[in-house]
Image (cartoon, grey):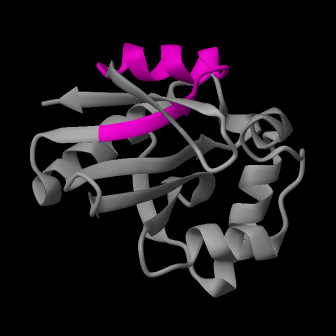
Amino acid sequence: MESISFEEITEDTLYIALEMINSNPEYNLLEHGKEMRTEKDLRLELLNERTTSVFIKLDDTYIGVIDYLVNNPKDNQPWLGVFLIHRDYQGYGFGSQAYFQFEKQLLKKAGEVIRIGVLKENRIASEYWEAKGFSYYQTTFNENGKEILCLEKRV
């Protein structure tokens, strides 16, 4: 059986994260208004003081990216910012396996609730997270004026 693990994203491995993110141009277009992201974009998003960014690894292979806050100062809850599986590894259950393992690790640090914001028009993501036990609790807007569905999971 394959083993899922997590590894911190660093300046030296940022190019790998860029390849993961850019394997999903539809997501990039929906989320950021462009199909391809740059290293500069990801440096700002993933290598900062506020969030923690890790690779999802399947044995020794990088298959995805997670960016999260252990404690969001706005509500004192943990938040998932990015949870993305490389296009080549989607549809095999690796994302679900990685999420549930990640959830256990995060809840040890953070308590009983995990939150995530999903663009209202991203029905695939909403359905994915609802299938993982998340439920809607409010709507808000991002800095670009797009509607965000706030979902949470209480464990």
Q: Note whether residue 62 is visible.
A: yes
**Which residue is rendered at x = 85% and y = 40% of the image?**
25
Residue toward you, 78 or 143: 143
Q: From what the image shows, is residue 38 above or below residue 26?
A: below
**Which residue is rendered at x = 12% and y = 54% of the image?**
108
**Which residue is rendered at x = 35% and y = 49% of the image?**
79
Q: Where residue 65 appears, x then y in whole percent?
A: 57, 54
Pick the quarter of the image with the C terminus: top left
Pick the quarter of the image with the N terminus: top left
Residue 101 is drawn in which quadrant? top left
Reply yes or no: does residue 30 show up in magenta: no
Span highlighted in magenta in the image: 115-134
Q: Where residue 150 appears, x then y in whole percent?
A: 40, 31
Q: Note whether residue 1 is visible.
A: no
The answer to whether residue 1 is left or right of residue 37 is: left
Q: Where residue 20 appears, x then y in whole percent?
A: 72, 53
Q: Where residue 126 appears, x then y in whole percent?
A: 51, 19
Reply yes or no: does residue 131 show up in magenta: yes
**Which residue is rendered at x = 47% and y = 37% of the image?**
117
